[in-house]
Image: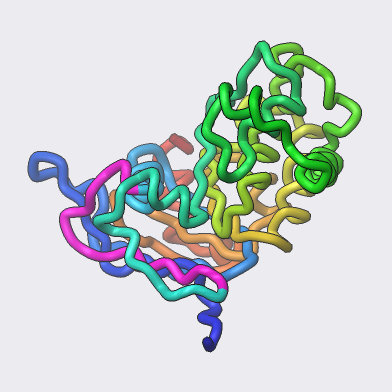
Amino acid sequence: MKQNENVLEINNISVSFDGFYALRNVKANVKRNTIHFFLGPNGAGKTTLLDIICAKTKPTQGTIMYYPKDREPMRLTGMKEYKIVNEGVGRKFQVPSVFINLTVEENMILSLKGHKGILDSIFHKPGKEELDEIDRILEKVGLLDEKETRAGALAHGKKQWLEIAMQIVQKPEIIMLDEPAAGMGKPETFRTGEILKEIKKDCTIIVIEHDMDFVKQIADKVTVLHEGKVLMEGDITSVLADETVQAVYLGRGGE
């Protein structure tokens, strides 16, 4: 089977809420094993687009096509949310949702693909292979030494890294991240970027973010949305140099 270099194709997506168009004819292709940012001022439609990809919101028109590795292409529009997750499209929201009373390792065990929840993990202990994989991922995100730490005791940045690790252990093909650097200091933000660069070897990462330094650090491609439409797409240098983009960002008080 010939491998499509795009893992996701967003085709003419529009969505209207009571006559107001949150997105209008949005087209974008996300390439495999890249970090693709969707940028834009508040109200540009970034979160709505992620909601449509994971089926939380239904589009008024258009399709989302997904090209998983070594499997048949599938149309995500019209699929159920849980089915999209099972097919390898994961999403992490801005606020970490870890089990705060469980250890880092226990959180990872609960996230293993195929696990049915807390009871299942009590009766079915993970095998050596799974535990080794958990260690490998925790090392990747810098949390191996915190394996026995209660998740609630982790600093904000480390909670975010744990949640990213909980996504990776499910072996997704795409991870969508909603402002992963929000609330982090500069060193934590930089470290998050390095973690994501490491992760993209195994999957594709779609990010919504406001922190421009973070975008410059890791973006392979950037799509700028404005008032529900694609304003520009390209690499971060050419996007930031564009006068229209500057006017949208700077001319509106950077909202």
Q: Which of 3 and 64 is in front in this view?
A: 3
Segment colored magenta: 55-69
Q: Which colour scheme is used?
A: rainbow
Which x, y percent locates residue 127?
77, 41
* Quadrant where the image shows the C terminus: top left
Which x, y percent locates residue 111?
61, 36
Which x, y percent locates residue 8?
45, 67
Q: Which of 226 and 82 is in front in this view?
A: 82
Q: Which image quadrant for residue 199?
A: bottom right
Q: Residue at x 36, y 61 (%)?
A: 230
Q: Looking at the image, is 80 positioned above or below residue 34? A: above
Q: Which residue lies furthest to the right in this view?
A: 145
Left or right of 100? Residue 178 is left
Left or right of 176? Residue 129 is right
Which x, y percent locates residue 13?
26, 61
Q: Which residue lies furthest to the bottom in this view?
A: 2
Number of marks drawn: 0
Q: Nearer the viewer, residue 46 or 163?
A: 163
Q: Which residue lies furthest to the left in this view?
A: 19
Q: Which image quadrant for residue 162?
A: top right
Q: Is residue 190 visible?
A: no
Q: Looking at the image, is 71 positioned above or below residue 40? A: below
Main SS category, magenta section = loop
Q: Residue at x 76, y 28 (%)?
A: 105
Q: Looking at the image, is 175 positioned above or below residue 150? A: below
Q: Which residue is drawn at 70% across and 28% down?
A: 184
Q: Which image quadrant for residue 186?
A: top right
Q: Is residue 58 magenta?
A: yes
Q: Residue at x 46, y 71 (%)?
A: 67
Q: Can residue 50 be seen in this view?
A: yes
